[in-house]
Image (cartoon, helix red, strand yellow):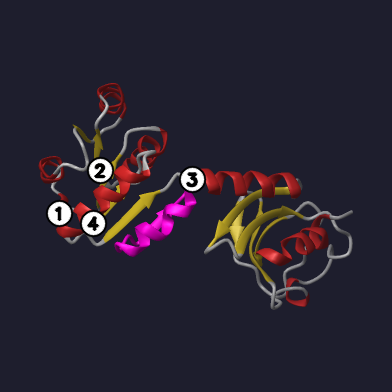
Amino acid sequence: MYVVVMGGGRVGLNLASFLISDGHDVTLIESESNLCNNAASELDALVICGNGTDIKTLDEANLKDADVFVAATGNDETNLLACVLVREYNVSKIIARVSDPSHGAAFKKIGVDSVISPELTAASYLEKLIIRPKIADLVVLGRGDAELLDITLENKGVIGKRIGDISPTENFIIVAVYENGNITIPKPDMILNRGMKISILVKTKFARDVMKKFTKI
């Protein structure tokens, strides 16, 4: 996949690095010379020192061949204008970062496929880690209405029971079991043991109850 990322700051640089590590072709566009030079020294990718709201720069990045364009600067107005211009290249997917979540509607209105607010996501993630301290890991899914929790079993109320007697319900399902460092798709007759690590897909509003069910001693 060929991805063009506009913005060589923290978000754009990390994103480009992850994509390159996964084997994707990446071009990064950055207007500030210091950030541009830093990106060029860190990334195994084409780095263009130019303005992503300039047609010549977009042409230099071969937007017509791109599968995805990501506007990742910290300036919402710049990201919005770039997305408007990129639409003319018929890129399959356009993703934009917004610093102010209230601007999200404007991006959607011009046809941006996905609007992401890293700041809002990070704050929400931290809040969940604070109020659910016994969760080993957490991933927020969809529009925030579901979560994938990694939990270590502690509650004697479920220890020794068959997975099929507990899961699935209307509110959660055990989707993975980790044993001896290996991941296993759970079977109904598998027994839950103390200290076992499991992954649970749960509706967000029931996450606290599920956490108590499996971790409260």
Callout 4 amino acid: Asp
Mark pair 3, 2: CA separation: 21 Å
Mark pair 3, 1: CA separation: 27 Å
Q: Residue at x 77, y 67 (%)?
A: 191
SS label for mark 1: helix
- Which region of the structure is painted magenta? 100-117
Q: Which label's residue is closer to the chain start, 3 or 1? A: 1
Of residues 151 and 129, the one drawn nearer to the viewer in this rendering: 129
Q: Which label's residue is closer to the chain start, 3 or 4? A: 4
Count of numbered tags: 4
Instruction: From the top left corner, tell me how far across and down residue 121 is, in percent.
Output: 54, 49
Circle 3: is it few (<14), some (14-19), or many (20+) Cα within 10 Å?
Answer: some
Callout 1 amino acid: Asp
SS label for mark 4: loop
Asked if disc 3 and disc 1 are in contact, CB closer than 8 Å, the reply is no
Vertically, is 64 above or below 171? above
Of residues 194 and 124, the one drawn nearer to the viewer in this rendering: 124
Asked if disc 2 and disc 4 are in contact, CB closer than 8 Å, the reply is no
| Pair 3/4: label in front | 3
Circle 1: is it few (<14), some (14-19), or many (20+) Cα within 10 Å?
Answer: some
Mark pair 3, 4: CA separation: 22 Å
Q: Residue at x 37, y 58 (%)?
A: 106
* Residue bearing mark 1: 65
Q: Which label's residue is closer to the chain start, 3 or 2? A: 2
* Residue bearing mark 4: 67
Labelled disc at residue 118: 3
SS label for mark 3: helix
Asked if disc 4 and disc 1 are in contact, CB closer than 8 Å, the reply is no
Mark pair 2, 4: CA separation: 10 Å
* Residue bearing mark 2: 26
